[in-house]
């Protein structure tokens, strides 16, 4: 089939990898002018995620780019360590920078998949035989299927399911992320500082530059997700007067070319497909922090492509089976993410102290290493990955 995927972050290229191996013709359209590099760290946890990466043939390439992060020290306003978050909980089994993951996926698909950067889908019209897509720049084209893998702010979801507030469930937490020159002397480790409803994290996965995350809780905040300067002002205002080394981090934020900001939002839909159009990853079921979003993207891509093959191209059967398999897994992951605000941005100094004591205490509970692993993987492994046969057409770039 001739299949269009919207979005070239993680879910889209992961699906493209599988579809081209099954012999389909695949186009990926991406609004960014080029592949996005850098960015925050993402992780994979437990046997389900790691087995999926192995089946994709990417595990070794990603292991070579792993951050191998150590613990995240929790400090007070004077910079004194008061507790630490174990790496096993924070970084999972395999952690890489989002940009590194994108590069590995692109390298594995670029030879057999057409990437259409700097463009978006403007309109979608479908009938029983196919989908007519109008692009912002490229000429119109008719596809057999269209997949929306374009994130929380999915244009495909808006076009096919409407822009309804009921689809989005904000968790009331917002975050800005950017890279700056290393000033804290970190190497494969990090530091976190918290005040009520505010947290600052600085990590240096590979030494040198450090990745800064500034997270705050404020239910109901409205902002334009396309207006970067407005987002910088929001972060600067919310963190004005926050202690530790926050002022110098705010100054660096103003110069950061890779600044990114968004809300933590879950996506909840009654169904993930409409006719010949289907949603994948955050576009259809964003989990939020701690919701295994990257793992859900690659697992969902594997299941969707394999079910299309098993159904011999009958998209109605494949989409139904994909949703039946993935929905319970998604629900489990989203439920875990519901508690993320208490961990990321405790609302009172008492709750900050309770969080810090928890991480300080569990280190002394026997056997701590097994407890850390259980906490890190309990939802990520809550899925029985089907034993799909290998693609009949196996092409590896």
Image: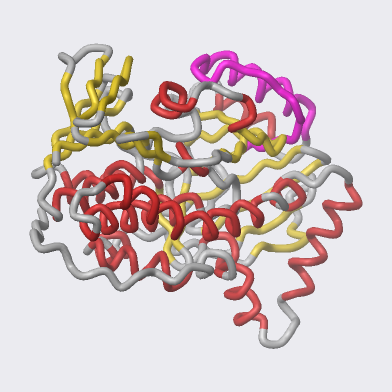
Tell me if 40 is positioned left or right of 195 in this view.
left
Residue 215 counted in the magenta span: yes
Front one among 135 and 176: 135
Front one among 213 and 269: 269
> Measured along the vertical axis of the image, is residue 54 above or below residue 77?
below
Task: Give the image quarter of residue 265.
Answer: top right
> Measured along the vertical axis of the image, is residue 101 above or below residue 195?
below
Tell me if 233 is positioned left or right of 301 in this view.
right
Tell me if 72 is positioned left or right of 26 in this view.
right
How far from the left and from the top, in percent, is residue 254?
55, 21
**Which residue is located at x 42 percent, y 58 percent?**
67
> Measured along the vertical axis of the image, is residue 21 above or below residue 202?
below
Task: Give the image quarter of residue 376.
Answer: bottom right
Span of residues in magenta: 214-242
How far from the left and from the top, in percent, is residue 99?
35, 43
Front one among 231 and 47: 47
Circle count:
0
Front one among 324 and 351: 324
For the N terminus, give its image quadrant. top left
How far from the left and from the top, in percent, is residue 370?
61, 82
């Amino acid at each position: 089939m001739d299949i269009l995927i919207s979005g070239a972050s993680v879910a889209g290229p992961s699906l493209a990898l599988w579809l081209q191996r099954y012999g389909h013709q695949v186009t990926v359209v991406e609004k960014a002018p080029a592949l996005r590099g850098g960015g925050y760290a993402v992780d994979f946890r437990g046997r389900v995620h790691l087995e999926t990466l192995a089946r994709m043939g990417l595990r070794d390439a990603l292991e070579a780019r792993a951050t191998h992060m150590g613990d995240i020290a929790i400090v007070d306003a004077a910079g004194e360590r008061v507790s630490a978050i174990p790496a096993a909980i924070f970084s999972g089994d395999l952690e890489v920078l989002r940009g590194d993951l994108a590069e590995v996926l692109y390298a594995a698909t670029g030879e057999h998949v057409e990437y259409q950067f700097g463009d978006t889908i403007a309109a979608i019209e479908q009938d029983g035989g196919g989908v007519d897509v109008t692009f912002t720049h490229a000429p119109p084209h008719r596809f057999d299927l269209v997949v929306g893998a374009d994130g929380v702010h999915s244009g495909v979801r808006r076009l096919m399911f409407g822009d309804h507030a009921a689809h989005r469930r904000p968790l009331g937490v917002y975050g800005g992320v950017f890279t700056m020159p290393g000033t804290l002397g970190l190497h494969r480790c990090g530091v976190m500082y918290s005040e009520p409803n505010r947290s600052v994290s600085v990590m240096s996965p590979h030494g040198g530059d450090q990745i800064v995350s500034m997270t705050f809780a404020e239910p109901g905040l409205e902002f334009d997700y396309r207006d970067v300067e407005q987002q910088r002002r929001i972060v600067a205002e919310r963190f004005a007067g926050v202690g530790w080394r926050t002022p110098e981090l705010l100054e660096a934020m103003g110069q950061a070319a890779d600044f990114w900001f968004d809300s933590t939002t879950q996506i909840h839909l009654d169904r993930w497909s409409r006719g010949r159009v289907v949603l994948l990853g955050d576009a259809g079921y964003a989990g939020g922090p701690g919701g295994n979003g990257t793992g859900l993207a690659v697992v969902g891509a594997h299941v969707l492509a394999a079910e299309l093959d098993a159904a011999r191209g009958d998209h109605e059967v494949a989409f139904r089976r994909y949703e039946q398999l993935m929905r319970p897994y998604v629900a489990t992951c989203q439920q875990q993410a519901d508690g993320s605000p208490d961990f990321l941005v405790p609302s009172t100094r008492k709750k900050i102290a309770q969080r810090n004591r928890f991480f300080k205490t569990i280190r002394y509970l026997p056997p701590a290493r097994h407890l850390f692993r259980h906490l890190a993987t309990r939802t990520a492994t809550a899925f029985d990955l089907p034993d799909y046969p290998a693609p009949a057409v196996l092409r590896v770039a």
